[in-house]
Structures are given as structure tokens and as C-alpha cells.
Amino acid sequence: MTAFNINDLWTILPELFLLGATCAILLIDLFIKPTQRDITHWLSLVAVAVTGWLVCCSAPADGQGISAFNGMFLRDGVATVLKVFVLLTTGLVFLYSRGYLRERKLFVGEFYLLLLFATLGMMLLVSAGNLVTIYLGLELLTLSSYALVALNRDSSVSSEAAIKYFVLGALASGLLLYGMSMIYGATGTLDLAKIHAVADFAGSSPHRTLLVFGLVFLVVGVAFKLGAAPFHMWLPDVYQGAPTAVTLFIGSASKLAAFGMTWRLLDGAMGGMHAHWTLMLSVLAVLSLAVGNIFAIAQTNLKRMLAYSTISHIGFMLLGFVNGSSAGYAAAMFYMISYSLMAAVAFGMIMLLARAGFEAEEIDDFKGLNQRNPWYAGVMAIAMFSLAGVPPLFGFFAKLMVLKSVIDAGQMWLAIVAVVFAIVGLYYYLRVVKVMYFDAPQDDTPLALPPDRSFRWVLSVNGLALLFLGVAWGPLLDWCNRALSVVDIAK
Amino acid sequence: MPVSHLLSLLIWLPILGAIAVLAFGRQPGVARWLSVLVAIATFVCSIPLWTGYLPSVPGMQFVENIAWIGALKANYALGVDGISIALIVLTAFTSVLVIIGSWGPIDKRVSQYMAAMLVLEGLLIGVFAATDALLFYVFFEGMLIPMFIIIGIWGGPRRVYATLKFFIYTFLGSIFMLVGLIYLHMKTGEFSLAAFSHASLSAKEQAWLFFAFLIAFAIKVPMWPVHTWLPDAHVEAPTGGSVILAAIMLKVGGYGFIRFSLPITPDASQEYAWVVIAMSLIAIVYIGYVALVQEDMKKLIAYSSIAHMGFVTLGIFISLALVRANVNPLGARLGLQGAMVQMISHGFISGAMFSCIGVLYDRLHTRMIKDYGGVANVMPWFAAFAVFFAMANCGLPGTSGFVGEFMVILAAFQDSPLIAAVAAFTLIIGAAYTLWLVKRVIFGEVGNDKVAKMQDLDAREWIVLGAFAIGVLAVGVYPKPLTDLMEPAVLQLVQQLGMARA
């Protein structure tokens, strides 16, 4: 054990700043009047933006990593990429939700604080170098999320969703912890890199059974958190029951963090058992693709449909892991980033259409949107075509990279399964476009847009970004590839 | 020397024009004029492609190559040979007529319709110009989106069913091609078509790839038995949508066979050529009979399109049999040339036939044959055009319909007189269903009071049908400029086919 190193504090400066800012916002929020809540809003955005700037400007060079606190905390390329996008999507959540929350009398300081703490948890999670830090980050994220889902205390649907989320989430955490304890038992260390180095995966190893069991529990715990079938039961209820602002957060930012956790645990610690977990993940992936895509067809509630679509996208992302190479993980990370940006547009559109007392979460609420407001119908159409994976939109290229990594791994049958379900998935995305463009509107009045200009502008930019990234996705892909080609970690 | 970046200009001019139409086209009049100007400008820009093409220089011309995705070695690579040039000029030409043709009939959300048409035009030109497989795929799939919108918004009563079927069916085909392309990328490390055609592939790999391509392009052409989306899409689409669909989009399938199946998987193509030839013959004969019994004019022409496209696939694959089994490169050239001429000619004829039906539909709002009769009595000019195009559809010598079919049958005869005989059967069936249609709609007594009140062509319709008629006649009477244009590309392809790869 080495002594406390003051430089370690510099390494976690972005996290420290976010923590300090969150505490400050907590105090400031106590002393301002409810009518001045906009201050909290802008302060939170500034906090997120500054944290993002700190993450970027102190990022280690390509292929380098910094380790702090005896390997508890890592700053490598993956952490940087994921943090940037976690902070970006969190910022989008803040920008999109203000009017929505205000109309529902949910425009309270708690929303901002819980979200900031959850963000801190995610930043910790994607930087974790130790089983303890993983668990710490994860719990900070999920406990905040449980509370966020229940934000609308008067709604029984919300409370039910929160209870479900909490019970199943606690179960998953328990499974994860159990798996971690087995792995600790077999290897005698909690450090991910050391587990990777020490663990004896050979068939003759006396710890083999323990390790395999530990791995199974880890995979199950991760699958719960990701929402991969058959551990997806909580996801549709939570998506539908939570206030849309919270659904947006769970569907975008926290999926990025879940990817980071999956990668750290499976490749970082258990990389030596690659042959075992790729098999488990391919089963999970195929099941998720099947369940997600087929059940989504039957949904009439847009939020629920998007929940099932999330399950299918998680399945697609897991396919990237099957390759077991850095190119495969880069493809999976690229996929997750694209998904979070697309989900942000879709849920943002639901909030754009929502008014006081009207949730706009049924697919039929989008009827005839093209006649009422062609611009936002176009934005939503871009998001839907992108989610479906139609070129030249961003979603297609994310699918392309994952498919490529699967085919490179020689798993042709998995690629075929994936594309067959992509065709199934196409139908329900097209149905939303159909409703917006081909159906007559329920009321002919032009769409009443929310007064919040920043929301409208950013949502439009977010939608156009899917088109733009469909043309210029090379730099982002290169960034993901570079992030995963880490060679050495400086202590 | 040709203008640099001419191909990029041709792709992006209509797409940027579409954005301008959306932005400034709140007034229908502005949208109409703006879009027609953009379309004409694109057509004018496509002429230097033809005049600046140097037949003596082998390979692709007007080449542009910009690195796109470094990690995949995918490039924004464009280039054309004679085959692509003919199709690009046809696309630009037809788009102008389609946009002029929809000035009157489209009266709701005009700017969106015009914008969708222009985007479609740009993407179609992109398909014919791309020499990078990933870029090709992006254009190939991207064009589904505007067509989906065109059929879905401005289509007939069952438009939603038809457009969803169209989108999902075509997507289904092409996504397997995507898997094939990624596989080829794995083998070669890049996405350029030139690299793909030099990849060393075993017979088994070629067979898989061949079928992946076959599904994609057979659905696009469409070939029997995956043609069922086409009648639905055609019947429900607005006139302009039908014209673009028949005249250009179906050609993408034939073009795909020539650009992908033949050069990349020549051995498998030869081995399974009989499958495609059989499917083509079934399309020619069986679909011809199906067309005979249709009561809906648009459906009839849709089925006739499938039958005529059968000649394209027959010509392409018979040439393979000729060059490989019979060592008859001259016959192979004839077959490929015939297929290409048939593609261009069918572009003119089907576009014209659908425009004719559009003219009738705009007046009576029905496509049923029984609602018409004796149109010649009230619309003599229209009748003259319609009969002329019907003759071209039957393959009357002197029209473009004759040239392509004759060349393909001639080539088929050199391989097997039986195939030629079956294919030639179309001349009878084609004449039967087309002339019977003409008899019931154009000639005879005036069918009913509504028909009696119909007005003859206005100036706008004159321009559209007149331009198509000039195209049909020009290719029919003097096809040499067209065949000369495509000759070097066909020659190169025949040489390529002569060399076994596996």
C-alpha cells in the first residue's frame, strides 16, 4: 500500500468539482424562492458544462491512462469518452425538462440534485478500477434514479414504477455483490487489473468453479442493469411510469454508464474468461433482440414502445462484445453513444408535445404532426429512421460497425439474426412516421410550442446532429477506437 | 476537359434545391417554379457528362475520391462509365418531366412533394455514380425514405399498406446485401468496388454472396416471385411516384446486377444463371398473363413493367452463359447491350404510360378500365400519344421497345433457341394486354357522360408526353449513340466475365 498521493486529487478534479458544485447548488436551492428556480437550472447546466470542460482539458493522451488511489480510480480514454457523453446527455436532460417539469409542478430542486448526484455516480462508475468503486458508483447512480422515478409522488403509476425499479434493482445489486464476493474469494483481490492478472482460468485450477459462478452472477447483475432480456421486466414499467424527463435520463445517460460498467467488469477483470462470457452475452443479445423487437410491435404507448426498443438496442450493443477485441468494444461504445443521442431526441419530442395535463405519450398523439408542425415532425422522423437504422442516418452506421465486428469474429449466424430483427424493428419505427405523416391530425390547430427557446433550439440541433453524424461519423468512431486502444496505465 | 466535381454537383444540386424548396416554398407557385428550375439545371448539368465522356479511355471517368471513413477505408468515391451515364441522364430527364407533370395534380403540401422528388433524384444519381460499396448502399437505402413519404402522403386509399410493404420489402432485401458487403470488406479491407471485384473468393463464398446480392436486386427489379410489392406500390403511388418508380428505381436493380453480381461473383453467377434465367422467363410469360386480366390500368402497366424488366435480367444472365459456356463474347455483348437498351427504353415507355394514366386519372379520378371507353373521341391528341406509347410497349419496330427486346432475344437464340422462343412469346402477350387495354379505354363508343366531358391535353401535359415520345422515337430509330456510349463498359464487363476467378 502506498501512501496518500496529493496528485491523485488532481486526477479526480472533475468529479471533485461536480461534487462541490452539487453541494453548493443544494445549499443555494434551499435559500431561493420557488419562483427563482431557474437559478438552480442554469447553475446545474453550468456545473455540468464546467465538469465536461475539466474532463476534456485534463484528459490523458491517447493510449495513456492515469490511475489514482492505488488503482481504485482510472482515467483512460474510455472514461473520457463516456464521461463527455454522459455529461452531454445529462445537459440535454436539463435543457429538455424544464418546461415539462414546471407544468407538472415537479420543477423542484430535488430533480436537479438527484440528477447531479446520479451523474457523479456515473462518472465514478465509468472510471472505476476496483470492484468497490464500481459498486459505489453504481449505487450512487441507481439510488438517485429510484428517487427520480418516484419524483411525481402523487402519481400511483410513478410510485409503482419506482417500487418495481427499486426491488428489482436491489436484487440485481445483490447478485452483482454476490458475484464480486466469489471473485474476491477466488483471487484475493478487488482490483480489476489484478483480478485479470491473478485469476487462474485454466481447467485444472481449483478456483475454476468459483470463478465461473462469480462470472455468471456478474453477467446477470450487469444484464439486469442494462435491461437485457430475460432480465428486462422492470424496464417497460419504469420507462412508462417515470416522468418523461426521468425516462429520458434513464434511457440515455445511464445506458452509457452501464456500458462502461459492463466493459470494465467483463473485459477489465474477467477478460481471461472471454470464451465463457461471450457465449452468455450472445444468448442475452439474441433474446433481447427478439423480445425487444417483437413486443415493441404490440405497443400503443410510445414510451413503452421505446422501452422495448431500448431492450433491442441493448441486445445489438451486446453483440459488439462478442468479438472480444478492442474494435468490438469500440463498436459497442459507438453504438451506445448513438443510441443515447437518438433516445434523447425521441423522448425530447414527447416532452415537446406534452402540455399541462397531457402527456403526449401515446403514439396516436403524434397523429398528423406533419400538418401541425412540419419541422418537428421532420426531427422526429429523423430520430425514428435513425433508430431503425436506415442510412444515411447515424443509427445505421452504429449498426454497421457492430455488424462488422460480429462478422469479423466469424459469427455469421449472429449477424443474420441481428439483421432479421432489424427488419422486424423497422416496422414499429415506421409506424410512428406513418402516424405523423400519413394520418389526419386529431386537432388541426398548429402545434403549441413550449415557450422555452433553449429547449426547442437544442432539440432541433440534436435531431440534425443525427443527420450530420450520419455523414461525418468518422471522427467519433476514431475517437472510440483510440480510447479503447489503451496500452499502459501510469501509476 | 470536363468540369471537376461534376458528379458531386449532380448529386447535391437537387438535394440542396430540395432544402431551398422546403425553406422558401410556402407558396405552392414558388415551390413549383423553384423545383422545376432545380430539376432543369440538374438535367443541363448532366449533358456534359455525355458529351465529355471519352469512349476510348477505359474504366471510370469523372472520378472523385475523398477519404470518408479512415478506419474502414471507405471513400466518397464517384465515377461513371457509359452505363451509369445513360442512367444518370435518364434520371435527370425523367425528374424534370415528373416535376412538371405534378404541377397540377399535387395541390396539398406542394413544397414537401417537390422536395421529396428532388431528394430522390439526388440519391438516385448517387446510386449510379458511387464506386464505393458503402456509399452505394447509403444512397441505395436512403432513397427509400423519400419514396416512402411520397407514396404515403400523396397516394391512393390503401397508400399506408402499400408504402409500408414497399419499404419493408426492399429493406429486407438490401440488408442481406449489407451483410455480404461487410463480409467482402473483411476479405479485402476496403469498400471500393474495384477491390471487391479482385477479391479471391472460394466457390462457396461466391455462392453465398451471389444470393445475398440476388435477394437485394431481385426485389428491386422486381423479379418473380418477389414482385408482389410493386403492383401495390404502383397502384397507390401518385402519378409522379409511379413514373420515378418504374422509370428509374427499378433500373437500380438491373444496374446492381451489372455492378455487383457479375464482377464480384462471376463464377457463382454463371453457376446459378439458370435460376435467374428461369425467373426471368417466368416473369416474361406468367406475369404477362397476369397483366392480361387486370381491371386497374395502373396495375396492368405495373405487371407489364415486371414482364419487361424480365428482359433486362434475361439479357444480363444470358450473356454470362454465352461468354462462359459457348465462348461467344460477341453474343454476350449483344445480350448486355440489349439489357441496357431495354432499361433505358423501359424508362421512357413506362414513364410515359404512367403519365398517360395520370392524365386520365386527373380528369375522372378512377383508374378502372371499365370507367373509360372511347376516349379518342373526346381527347384526340391524348389518344394519339397513348396509342403510340402502347405500340412502343408492345415492341413495335421503330420504337425503343423493339430494339432492346430484339437484341436480347437475338442473344438468347445464340445460347438456346428454346429460351429465345419462350422470351419471344412476350411479343404476343405484350401486344395482347396492351392493345386490349387501348381498345377498351381509347377506342369504341364514348363510355359514359363523364368521359364525354373530358378535356384534351393542356400545354403542361403536352410537354411531358411529347418529351417522352421524343425519347422513345430517338432510341427506337437511331439507338447507335446510346449503344456507342455504353459499348466500352460492356466490352470491359465481357472481358472480365471471361476470366474465371475461383
Image (cartoon, helix red, strand yellow):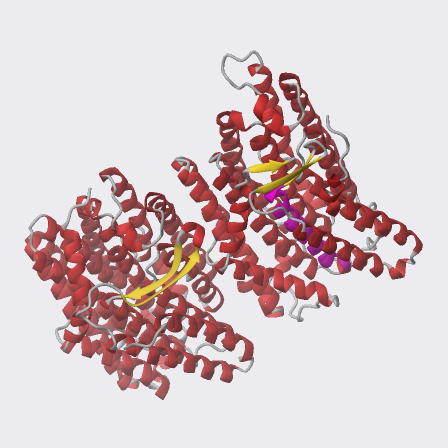
Q: Front-most of B260 and B155?
A: B260
Could you tell me what secondary structure mostly forms the magenta stretch? Answer: helix
Above or below A490: residue A248: below
Q: Residue B16 lies in magenta, yes or no?
A: no
Q: Is residue B208 visible?
A: yes
Above or below B15: residue A70: above
State left or right for residue B291 relative to residue B395: right
x then y, percent, for residue B306: 27, 60
All told, the count of numbered labels is 0
Question: In the rendered structure, which segment of residues is drawn in magenta?
Answer: A76-98
Q: Front-most of A403 and B239?
A: A403
Q: Residue A94 lies in magenta, yes or no?
A: yes
State left or right for residue B404 relative to residue A459: left
Q: Front-most of B252 and B203?
A: B203
Above or below A268: residue A253: below
Q: As drawn, which residue projects farthest toward the bottom?
A: B459
Q: Residue at x 72, y 37 (%)?
A: A137
State left or right for residue A26 relative to residue B436: right
x then y, percent, for residue B483: 16, 70
Specify the quadrant that holds the N terminus of chain B.
bottom left
Q: Where is residue A233, by image quadrant?
A: top right
Above or below B161: residue B55: below
x then y, percent, for residue B412: 10, 56
Q: Where is residue A193, by image quadrant?
A: top right
Q: Is residue A227 visible?
A: no
Specify the quadrant that holds the C terminus of chain B.
top left
x then y, percent, for residue A4: 77, 33
